[in-house]
């Protein structure tokens, strides 16, 4: 079972889960399941296939930043070896 809450940590409002949440294996959460009860079937059909398009911009920015830092470190090491 996953417990998530709304978060803007990565720019856009999304659902997020952290190590502080109660997320755990269903077998360990019998009390939670008892409180939630049987539940109900969905009342309407929702299509979320396009909901998160373009939301991984932060991933590409992070990758570009890491690659830039690595390039700078490599150049500095090469210059130090020439001395």
Image: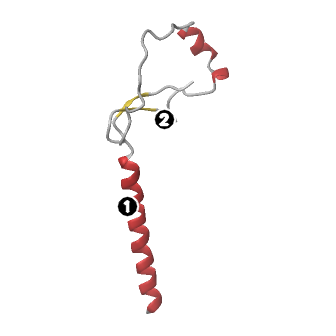
Q: Secondary structure at mark 1?
A: helix
Residue 51 vs 35, above or below: the answer is: below
- As measured in the structure, the alpha-carbon distance from the residue carrying label 1 to the one carrying label 2 is 24 Å
Q: In x, y percent, where is residue 39?
A: 53, 8
What's the mark number on residue 30? none
Q: Residue at x 36, y 40 (%)?
A: 9
Q: In x, y percent, where is residue 10?
A: 36, 42
Q: Which residue is mark 2?
A: 18
Front residue (pair 46, 64): 46
Q: Residue at x 36, y 54 (%)?
A: 61
Farthest residue in the right direction?
27
Front residue (pair 21, 78): 78
Q: Secondary structure at mark 2?
A: loop
Badge 1 crowding class, 10 Å Cα cut-off, few under 14, some 14 to 19, many 20 or more, is: few
Front residue (pair 36, 41): 41
Q: Residue at x 42, y 57 (%)?
A: 63
């Amino acid at each position: 079972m996953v417990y998530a809450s709304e978060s803007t940590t990565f720019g856009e409002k999304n659902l997020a889960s952290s190590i502080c949440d109660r997320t755990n294996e269903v077998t360990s959460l019998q009390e939670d399941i008892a409180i939630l009860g049987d539940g109900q079937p969905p009342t309407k059909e929702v299509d979320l296939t396009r909901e998160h398009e373009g939301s991984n911009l932060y991933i590409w920015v992070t990758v570009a930043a890491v690659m830039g830092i690595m390039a700078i470190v490599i150049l500095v090491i090469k210059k130090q070896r020439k001395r």
